[in-house]
Amino acid sequence: VVYEQEGVFIHSSCGKNDDQDSLIAGILRVIEKENEVVVDWRPLDETLDTSNILCAGKDSSSVVEWNQTPKEKCSRGADRPSSYEAEWDMVTTVSFKKKPHSNGDATTHANGESKWSFLFSLTDLKSIRQNKEGMGWSYLVFCLKDDVKLPALHFHHGDSKPLIKCLEKHVTLNESPHDERVLLVKTQKSLSQSFENLFDEPSYGLLQKWKKDPYIVTMGKFSKVTNYIVGSLRSSDPSNQRRPPSEMADFLNDTIPGLKINQQEEPGFEVITRIDLGKQPEVSRREPVSTEEWAKNMDAEGRILDVDYIKRLIFKGGLCHTLRKEVWKFLLGYFPWNSSKEERANLQKRKTDEYFRMKLQWKSVSEEQEKRNSRLRDYRSLIEKDVNRTDRTNKFYEGEDNPGLILLHDILMTYCMYDFDLGYVQGMSDLLSPVLYVMENEVDAFWCFVSYMDQMHQNFEEQMQGMKTQLIQLSHLLRLLDSGFCSYLESQDSGYLYFCFRWLLIRFKREFSFQDILRLWEVMWTELPCQNFHLLLCCAILESEKQQIMDKHYGFNEILKHINELSMKIDVEYILCKAEAISMQMMNCKELPQTVSEILGIENSSVTPDSDTGEDESGAELSCPTTLYPSISTPVIAANGMRDGAPEMAETQSLTPA
């Protein structure tokens, strides 16, 4: 409870008869709950005469909406001041129905609260009308969205100003240009339209929730978190719109302990340490790998003849969809690249038995057992909620009682048995969905998902180590690529790149269309042309948006809004070409900093030791690093480079989904 005031009255009779005017005393509170801020009024005496009780219904936003009865009009007392009459004119546009009663039961809420009681979320507040004239007491009228007006609250004991000050901590109130007595709630559109499951939640508690569980907050409402961060750090004074980088660094370091990103404060310093990467080479893509190309690279026993070569083909063009069901098993590590067809069939048989043993573990848990297992109960609840809103526009998952949804649920529950310490964290359903879509098989999808989670595990761990590391690494790469752009982002309190959090957490799943994600993921799974290629994809997207961000002088909020609105608008082939060009540009650099070399996994006998971060200013010229994939620099790999005479690919065994 952040605000509480007794002696706040409702005048129940609306002035129909002054001598019968019932003054209902109550307590007004502003309450910070886990998910929202609510304004709550309830009478002191919960034993009200039922003749005075109003019937209230709830709308879709769980805000009390008083039923309107236009035929009932309240007359005004002749002795009331004209300003008072004007106020009641406004209030009585919404009058009230008496709730019918049966068997003499008291008319109360299920929890025993009187029907006079009301509460609403600040997210549904539209305006506040207050009196400006001295009348002995002040009063307020809350107007909700859809022009629903609540009964006037009269502050007989005290002023309403402390309430206004309290509300201003959570919402922005501006005086109406048309009526100085009306305070309008300033509303902002959500910065991200890419989530199908945004929650209506005020920003007051999101930062604390982010500290507690950044994954859930990120998946649901990360843009609101960042809006709150900047709002809490910037005052309303335009002259104080910038905070020192050190203060922002301290703030975010409290939020994500261990997140240390370099903040350059001396503009001339970067000129000394800037490294010329040279011009980005022209890069093009090829057609997806065909079934014929795949078959020609397999021997009679079903072994891949040239793993590196087939990976290069996949990196340059991806796979045709008919191949994905088989090749993804290799890319994700479920099938060993050097295995034969027979060995893979035996592996599938063993893994099928292992999967159903784990599935039986949670299937056989009784209701009584689950009541005493809170973790399993929580996992199940979160999985059921997420499954029902994962890729529901995709035909594979659309509709009620969809078999795809059942498999999605069962695989995630079984994964909790496989890794009970991690269990289920929101966002994991996004990683499984495309895998299950491609495999069309419960067992194969599970083991491919297990392999994918081995790569992504640190992203979902409680300590956030994977996310910390990636954000820091991305900062190093972007500074080397374009220190000027990095400096601009820092000048707008955006140098921490936390708007990339969602990209990294679920590997761009919400940024590209479903089909484009299939292409992007299979390219990344080749682990070419270097380590952490997904970070170069982030750099490619940011660099492609740099000109607009800088030319239009976007500030903190505008950058966040712009980045979030890129969702479903990014050309996957263009970004893959650009990221590859950046990788070639960096690998051909003669002065590649040691930190960057380690991030990309480039083995150099001699590199510049961290000159990009100012830890060393030596800058000696070095030999060009060896390219990780020599043939990849050829824009198009010709199909006639395949080995001839290889047998056609045999059909693989298919397992029936459980």
Image (cartoon, helix red, strand yellow):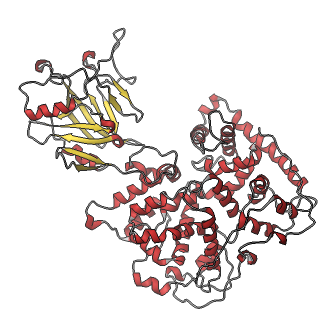
Q: Quadrant of residue 593?
A: bottom right
**Which quadrant would the N terminus be assigned to in this image?**
top left
- Residue 91 position in % (x across, y down): 21, 31
Nearer to me, 231 or 324:
324
**Residue 201 located left or right of residue 236:** right
Q: In the image as oriented, which residue stretches furthest toward the top?
A: 103
Q: Residue drawn at (59%, 76%), measured in percent from left and top?
A: 596
Q: Quadrant of residue 46?
A: top left
Q: Residue drawn at (66%, 36%), measured in percent from left and top?
A: 402
Q: In the image as oriented, which residue stretches furthest toward the left?
A: 79
**Residue 324 located left or right of residue 71:** right
In the displayed structure, 266 sits above or below 173; it is: below
Nearer to me, 163 or 514:
514
**Residue 465 located left or right of residue 81:** right
- Residue 433 position in % (x across, y down): 65, 48
**Which quadrant would the C terminus be assigned to in this image?**
top right
Q: Is residue 260 visible?
A: no
Q: Is residue 505 visible?
A: yes
Q: Quadrant of residue 231?
A: bottom left
- Residue 136 position in % (x across, y down): 9, 36
